[in-house]
Amino acid sequence: MDSAGADQVRTAVAQQGILLGQHTTQLTATSREVDLLTAQVAELNARVQELQQEALASRLSQNPMPTVLPPYDGDPNSCRAFLSQCSLVFALQPRRYVTEESQVAFVITLLKGRARDWATAVWDARAPFCATFDDFRTEMTKLFDRSARGDEAASQLAQLIQGSRSVTDYSIQFRTLAAACDWNEAALRARFREGLDEEIQDEIVTHELPRDFDSLVELALRVEGRLRRRRQRWTTRPSWTLNEGASNSSLTTSPPVAEPEPMQVGRLRLTAKEKQDRLARGLCLYCGKPGHRVIKCPLKAGAHHTKVLCIPVLLIPEGNFLDISVAAHWGIPAIPLPSPISVRSLNGLLLFSITHSTPSVETADLSGVPTEYHDLCRVFSKSRATSLPPHRPYDCAIDLLPGTSPPKGHLYSLSSPEREAMDKYISESLNAGLIRPSSSPAGAGFFFVKKDGSLRPCIDYRGLNDITIRNRYPLPLMSTAFELLQGAKVFTKLDLRNAYHLVRIREGDEWKTAFNTPTGHFEYRVLPFGLTNAPAVFQALINDVLRDMVNRFVFVYLDDILIFSSSLQVHAQHVRQVLKRLLENQLYVKAEKCVFHAKSVSFLGHIISAEGIKADPAKVRAVAEWPTPDSRKALQRFLGFANFYRRFIRNFSLVAAPLTALTSPKIPFRWNCQAQEAFDVLKSRFISAPVLCLPDPERQFIVEVDASEVGVGAVLSQRSSRDGKVHPCAFFSHRLSPAERNYDIGNRELLVVRLALGEWRHWLEGAAQPFLVWTDHKNLEYIRSAKRLNARQARWALFFGRFNFSLSYRPGSKNTKPDALSRLFEGPERKVAPDTILPKGVVVGSLSWDVEQRVRKAVREGEGPRGCPEGLLFVPAALRPEVLRWGHESRVACHPGVRRSLAAIRQRFWWPSMAQDVRQFVLACSVCAQNKTSNQSPVGLLQPLPIPSRPWSHLALDFVAGLPPSRGNTVILTVVDRFSKAAHFIPLPKLPSAKEGDGSGMSPFQCSMGYQPPLFPAQEPEAAVPSALAFVRRCRRTWRRAKEVLARASRRTKAAADRHRTPAPQY
């Protein structure tokens, strides 16, 4: 190619490049215009949507949509649905609920029950999550939502079956769970098909399986409809009609059969014209009166006396069954079955399912109830007493102290029998409606205790009781019943069954009674045992129920009811009135614990009869039945108890003289007639005035308790208003059972407190003042504040919550009265040889000493004196020095002290003056005197240094040597002023010698301070300077005060040191 052609090509390429650049520029500008137009279009669309929403909001504000949402009570299964409905309301009415707080407030107004209590608390506390609806919904979902999601929904979906439900109900629940998990289409189809009824599955396999889930559900619905129609063709069910208003019922009466009527005087058969005329006027064809038809004519014989009904009854091996509509019409109670029973025909077709059964007929034990009350047998029913009672105005309210919330208790571990008992208790309580599942933030501990051979459930409500506001409703006093019983001759005592469970918890407070178990979280709907306000609430209820009878012929103390009358006829009417009133209010009586129509009855620690009221012998039985002492120690115990009441018994020393004489070890213990007479007289004096006084609930009680290894004892006392001294009101003693003897000392001491308070609860529970409990076990002082208790202690602590008392420690030396009562059951003392550590199989033989053989030979030749303890050898006077040398100087003894020498000799030998002889022998031992160090206090009293009168007059010098080198110094000279305790530390390269110290020609003070300390007190100058003189005087006053302080400190130090020293002998 020539140069001209190349130039043309280059020119063409350049032109094409220019053209391409122009096109690129134009394309860029066009793209910018398109982007601008797109942004404008998007802005216009947004504006249009905004205008549409404003128009919709304007219409809604003019005609607001009614907001009618059902209230939410905290049900875990409906929490998400409730919150979704609230979100829809906010979306549809944005102008009504503009702010986030208004949305939260709207949600709170729709809450009730425990949900309302929680929301009100967090709203009042201004919790941060109450600021926005989203945060509030999140917190509420965490607390109340228990709907299945994720793995939990998948688990429920894997176990879901149709059962006795329709395919529609089954598919709805299936779709609900499927929406919460991420299963694919194939898995959903397979699981839905497996959960269908077997008969429907058999029909579906004959069809081509659908490809999608919706088609499978539609096929199952068609198959179900086909099977239902087939079943209707095979089975025909009769129907009946009870009356005109029951035409929709599935049962009808059989057509009436014409029967000849009996002859009636003056009655003639109607003619055809008369019948037509009566029908036209709407008259009865039988009696001719309007308002009814002939079939319901009251004058027609047998019109309402006989009715023949055709009721379908099914007879199968499980029992007899009838239609549920028949049971509902005639009021026959029915309870749901745990699982439905399928009934099939002979050819295998499913006819229907049985879902309910009638409860078993309960026969109350009325053997101890008079026959005139058998018509009120329902008031003695056990099953009715365990059913859920209705709400009453006296439901138990649990009001907490401001700013508090129920604490969360411990989750106790349970044994295998306890788990079985817990499952049974939870199941029975849930079926009876006494408890229900809970999502409460509170949770008390749940455990079991053994009582009467069975396991009793117990809940630790101590934390809840501590923050509960007390109900101050008063409990009745027994003293108020004394005047009411005047003239009464017949008495009946009633005991209510399951008393506390007959009272409901106030609606909205159930969550506070929640308790934790290993299998779930539950809360009570009825009053549980252990709440602090339970006695007051129940007393208010029973007083209101029997208000017109109380203090007339009824006295009520909690669940114990006393009915009294002047005659048997009037008494029967009174008892009937009380039983009917209890039945009307759904309160039930325990027949086995009631006493009817008695002439005397034991009631709250008193024996009530026509003769009057007297103390129950049981309260003084512990003293009245005191066994005759059989040993000197038992007698000393009785006299120690009696010594506390000697000031109330005239001539106590003279009466007790025969008993006091037997306590002397110088005479043998032989019980005689004089001792028995004195013993009986003292016992009778203890249980009669002026020793025993009548309890007064207005004064403070004192309960003294003690426990021994075999029994427990207690004394109830009060300070008398006459003489100001403490008088006993009642005595209590109880022999421990073999199981109770295995308790440790702490549990035994706590057991006696529990038994004493239970024995005297009718006095202590309603006492006007807090009473005192004295025990000699100091650890019990902290029982009411202990953080961790075992099951038995926790149950007793709940019982203590019913009383207002303080428990304090009292030394055992001052607690002898209950101690003596607790040891009444001890047998005669027997010395038991201590068990050896080594087993008997390794013992080859017994070791015998020569001195022991000589003593035995001497005792055989001469008779030993009386009083020698059993198992010891009496040593004659001639052999005593040899025995003393054996117990102190032999190679086995090795010269021990007095105490050890005496202990070694007492193991084998005895003589009356043994202790004195051993002491004299050891003190006279020359070997011990020469080789043993003295254990006496050091000789010589402390001699303190004189106290200085001014600073730097007396110095203390010391060297600290052996230090690591520091700047060439290894020693520190310490100079301390003994008056002001001021110190100077002077570093030295080494310890100075005496020559070096003299070579300086200066004292250490002069080296340190720069001047020599004066040897004589400073004299006042002839020309006094006022300021200098004032300074000196002030210094002297300060020094005098400092010297006094130093003198006191020196005296204290000397006194403390001299307590461990003995004065030096004066020569």
Image (cartoon, grey):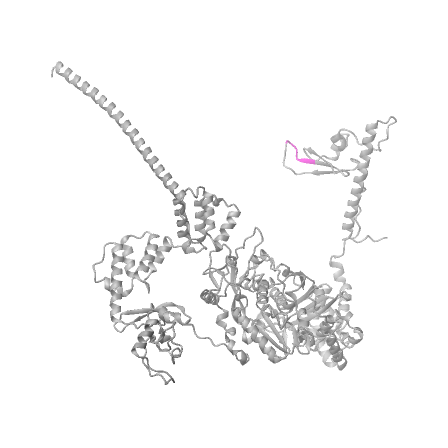
Residue 281: quarter of image: bottom left
Residue stretch rendered in magenta on the structure: 967-972
Q: Nearer the viewer, residue 769 or 503?
A: 503
Q: Nearer the viewer, residue 378 or 574?
A: 574
Q: Nearer the viewer, residue 938 or 556?
A: 556
From the viewer's perspective, is residue 986 above or below residue 843? above
In the rendered image of this protein, does residue 188 appear above or below residue 132?
below
Give the farthest residue toward the left.
Answer: 1
Main secondary structure of the magenta stretch: loop
Give x and y (percent) for residue 760.
64, 69
Query: Could you say where residue 1064 lies in the image, as x and y percent from the top left?
Result: 82, 52
Instruction: Report the quarter where the N terminus lies.
Output: top left
Give coordinates of residue 345: x percent, y percent: 28, 72
Residue located farthest toward the top when viewing the structure as drawn: 4
Q: Is residue 348 magenta?
A: no
At a point 66% along the width and 33% down the height, the residue shown is 969
Image point 67% across, 33% down: which residue?
Answer: 989
Q: Quadrant of residue 269?
A: bottom left
Taking 948 as reference, is 801 above or below it? Answer: below
Q: Is residue 829 visible?
A: no
Residue 78, can we see it? yes
Count the marks: how many? 0
Q: Position of residue 1018 (x, y in %)?
A: 84, 31
Q: Is residue 880 left or right of residue 964?
A: right
Q: Is residue 313 left or right of residue 18?
A: right
Residue drawn at point x = 41 percent, y = 70 percent: 334
Farthest residue to the right: give it. 1022
